Image (spheres, coloured by chain):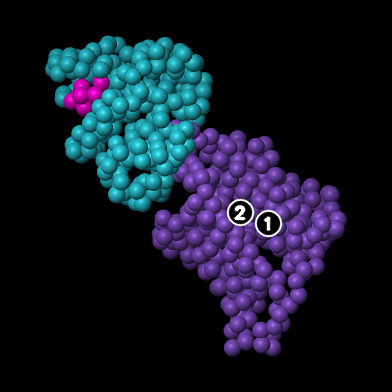
Chain colours: A purple, B cyan
Amino acid sequence: MALTGLLTFNILNSIALLVLLSLGLGVIYGMMKVINLAHGEFVMLGAYATVLCADAGVNLWLAMLVVAPLFCGLVGLVVERGLIRFLYGRMIDTMLASWGLSLGLIGLVTTLFGNTVRGVSNPLGGFTIGPYQTSLYGVFVILLAMAVCGLLWAGLRYLRFGLILRATMQNPDMAAALGVAPPRIYMATFALGAALAGLAGGVLAPVSGVSPGMGAAFIAKAFITVLGGGPAIITGTGLASGLFGTISELASFQTTPVFGQVALLLAAIIMIRLLPQGITGRFLRRSV
Amino acid sequence: MMLQVQGLRAGYGRIPILAGASFSVAQGEFVGILGHNGMGKTTLLKALMGYLPATAGSVTLEGRDITRLSPTARARLGLGYVPQGRQIFGALTVRENLRMGCLLSKRPEAETIEAVLALFPRLHRLLDRAGGALSGGEQQLLALARCLCGDPRLVLLDEPTEGIQPSINEEIVETLLALRRSRDITILLVEQKLDFIAALAQRILIIQKGAITRETTPEAVQDPALIAEFVGMAA
């Protein structure tokens, strides 16, 4: 019984991390059809912002929940204005440019902080499930993922900005004829996606080694989740995270974490073969 | 003068479509544009809305040169656009489509939507339905209602009867005639259906090979000889 509880908790934790890692990419890809290959590096920048702030004496919660997303949002704003906006509608060019950007960011961070693994200590203690000890931080990650999804969903569904954003992503020309300035909406969307990536980086900092190349470990998983989720960003990302997170965690539990990753990849290949438009491309089409 | 177009040239890439179109529309006027397929009717409206850059000529809206302005800037100056094919936001509900139309309205959103729904009672019961789930006629009504939510000074209306059932066409005519009586609104209408354009327009411009070649009256479009010569289609 306790083992089942622990396994359930680990699955939920795995799903929550996948949701946090993928949402930023989902916002940028789902809304703008821009494949941002620098997403992992935005996560890395968020993690570094958190570590550096914590080292400088800033409260860790403030660093990971406020500073990291704000910093990455600002970086995203600069990147969109300086690079991405010239490449809208040119998917391959955008992929190349963002890949180049990711290499540049890795090089810059390596030059500034060295190619060493840094980190911050876990701010929360542990708790027990029967005889098993596990981290309370996992509970925080699960609650945060739920809160972020809820806020994003409510924002897109009920706020005026959310309505404008959904309309612009469906038909930018028509939105322009109604007085919307699509370039500003694209800019805000890209910054929002980057900020979400920064938040994921901040949240990962206490549980993952922070190094210049850490983004590469997350980008594939995030992409698989976003593609598997389909066009509805939040519902799709949530469902795909649930599916892949469960499969990966169960496989890890039965065998090893390496096989867990393999199982995730196999599940993604099968799902994309069966549902090429993703889960919400086939089901729940009207969801956000 | 509400709209003044002088020697307007535009096209798609290197393919020129408009070849120096010149005409004007007075405030409160309903003007129709007739022409063969491929003569540049839709291109003209797209160029007026700013989707296609003008390669020569000028467009003036209420005395202000808007030739180089973006569609967003033109919309903010009071230019409304109901495109061919409706272009409603299919994944948004009817209410959300109307809310999008209200972005430029200076009145409260609920008040604006209520006022527009009074003109389109058919949309009342569809408010929570997805735009993409509506019939073609209902989508056309929605596209027109959405445009009117922004209180435009001049509406560019591109083939509103295309693929629409006759009962909705009549509803659109009645609504537009009611608008002509009740609101200070100007309409430039591109249309293929002669009875529709004759019922609404006070003046009709004939477009041939990207230029306005003749002006006529709604009564004259009943003349088969004229229609055969300049438009090449029957009522």
- The answer to whether residue B86 is left or right of residue A7 is left
Of the residues tagged 2 and 1, which is closer to the observer? 1
The chain under label 2 reads A
Q: Residue at x 43, y 20 (%)?
A: B10
Along the viewing direction, whichever of B98 and A86 lies nearer the viewer: B98
Cβ–Cβ under 8 Å for marks 2 and 1:
yes
Is residue A189 on the magenta stretch? no
Q: Does residue A213 show up?
A: no
Q: Which residue is mark 2?
A: A24
Give me the C-alpha separation between circle 2 and circle 1: 9 Å
Q: Quadrant of residue A10?
A: bottom right
Q: Which residues are magenta?
A: B192-201
Residue shown at the point (75%, 71%) measured from the top left? A124
Tell me which corner region of the image, top left, top right, bottom left or bottom right, holds residue A139. Answer: bottom right
Q: Amino acid at mark 1?
A: Leu
Disc 1 is placed on an element classified as helix
Please, is residue A110 above or below residue A168 in the view? below
